[in-house]
Amino acid sequence: MNAHAPIPTLDAGCDIRHERGQRAVFCGLTGIVWLHRKIQDAFFLVVGSRTCAHLIQSAAGVMIFAEPRFATAILDERDLAGLVDANEELDRVVRRLIERRPDIRLLFLVGSCPSEVIKLDLSRAAQRLSRSFHPDVRVLSYSGSGIETTFTQGEDACLAALVPEMPRAPEIGAPALLVVGALADVVEDQFARLFADLGIAEVAFLPARRAGALPAVGPDTRILLAQPFLTDTARALEARGAERIAAPFPLGSEGTTGWLRAAAEAFGVPAERFERVTAPGRARAAVALDLYRDRLANRRVFFFPDSQLELPLARFLSREMGAELIEVGTPYLHRQHLAPELALLPAGTRVVEGQNLDAQMDRCRAAKPDLTVCGLGLANPLEAEGLATKWSIELLFTPIQGYDQAGDLAELFARPLKRRARLEV
Ligand code: SF4
């Protein structure tokens, strides 16, 4: 991929449709699985039912061997029937937890469908508990409820809850870069090195690895979104004066280059320096991607709406791997945040926002794609019908951003095709 290739700024003419109907998505509690690894002294206490506890336990099954940093305060029948004071119960659970785990610096009370049904006000509970544990533990709340959300919105809600806690940056007239969205530590370190090599000195990441290291925000802050599902977080940061840098997302070599270039241009990095700093990464990614191009080129891919990563992934598969896009579903389409991605998709790409599950299943079956990217719930039935599938949730659990992960990203899509080819033999 040519580093000089222009990033179009206008929607190049996707066929954008909207659907409403039955949906098949995970809820926002799922985000705890990657967020608890990222913020190393935080604890996530879901205030929910046994169903919520099961979801978290199975999504994060590997954690049962470690002292986990998430748990569920289970609302039982008496709470739900209003027979006991759920606030008192919650205070008791939190007190016991903090006594047992003095390493906790930041506690998130995570709302769920049941806590919303009984209208348990977790933001007031968080304020109350924060006052009683100040200054050792900060208590915040957000909702991971599944009623009207997708699973990546849990991260958005969590980061948005952190924004009011961020200190105010002094106005010194020089911009500072804030990279927003949870990235695996290894990816974050690679990007930090690249920004340093580009000469962008003031760089911070949200979320920070430690609760006490929240970055500052103010009118000099320029935000670069690392994930496409951070609508509320971006809005909260903009309300504090930060300005968003429009960019594609750092998936694949081209996306990474476009993302870094957008930051470089906003910070006045000379073009020659940008080329020099990014050339080795682009070269490594080119070698890695070559290994998978044969398997992915001309493959017909269908995306069900699930993670909100669908547009950048589709752009990567189409432009860098030569795949053909049948349909790109996305739960929500933030036209501004996704504008650089829409502009890079092939003209006429069918982008479907929202979901009408039955109609979409019919279209998928009729199209007989070579690869279907979908949620866990749809993967088994589609596999049983002979379609190769990729679980979209894996793309959140695996480090896939940046030059050195581009090959891993391609491999994630190539693997189900390889497995199916073997089965067919
Ligand atoms: Fe709990 Fe609602 Fe998520 Fe189900 S959808 S696990 S009830 S928060």
Image (spheres, helix red, strand yellow):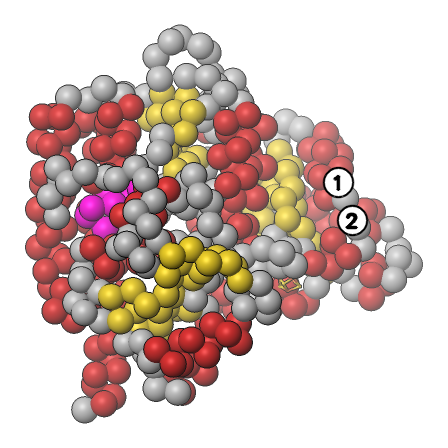
Q: Residue at 49% across / 34% down in the picture?
A: 234
- Answer whether residue 251 is magenta in the image: yes
Residue sitting at the far top: 172
Q: Which quarter of the figure is the C terminus placed in? A: bottom left
Which region shows up in magenta? 248-256
Q: Amino acid at mark 2?
A: Leu
Q: Nearer the viewer, residue 160 or 315?
A: 315
Position of residue 343 in the picture relative to residue 197 (left or right):
right
Rendered image quadrant of residue 287 = bottom left
Tags 2 and 1 touching, CB below 8 Å: yes
Q: Position of residue 423 (x, y in %)?
A: 25, 88
Rendered image quadrant of residue 26 = bottom right
Q: Is residue 321 shown above or below 240?
A: below
Q: Position of residue 382 (x, y in %)?
A: 41, 81
Residue sitting at the far bottom: 425
Q: Position of residue 79 (x, y in %)?
A: 83, 59
Q: Is residue 254 shown above or below 173?
A: below
**Nearer the N terminus, badge 2 or badge 1?**
2
Q: Which residue is mark 1?
A: 125
Position of residue 383 in the picture relative to residue 30 (left or right):
left
Q: Residues within 10 Å of mark 1 (few under 14, many from 20)?
A: some
Q: Nearer the viewer, residue 105 or 127?
A: 127
Q: Residue at 55% across / 25% down in the picture?
A: 239
Q: Can you tell which mark lies on residue 32?
A: none
Q: Which residue is mark 2?
A: 120
Distance between the alpha carbons at the discs numbered 2 and 1: 9 Å
Query: Is the CB–ligand 1 distance for label 1 below 8 Å?
Result: no
Q: Position of residue 277 (x, y in %)?
A: 13, 32
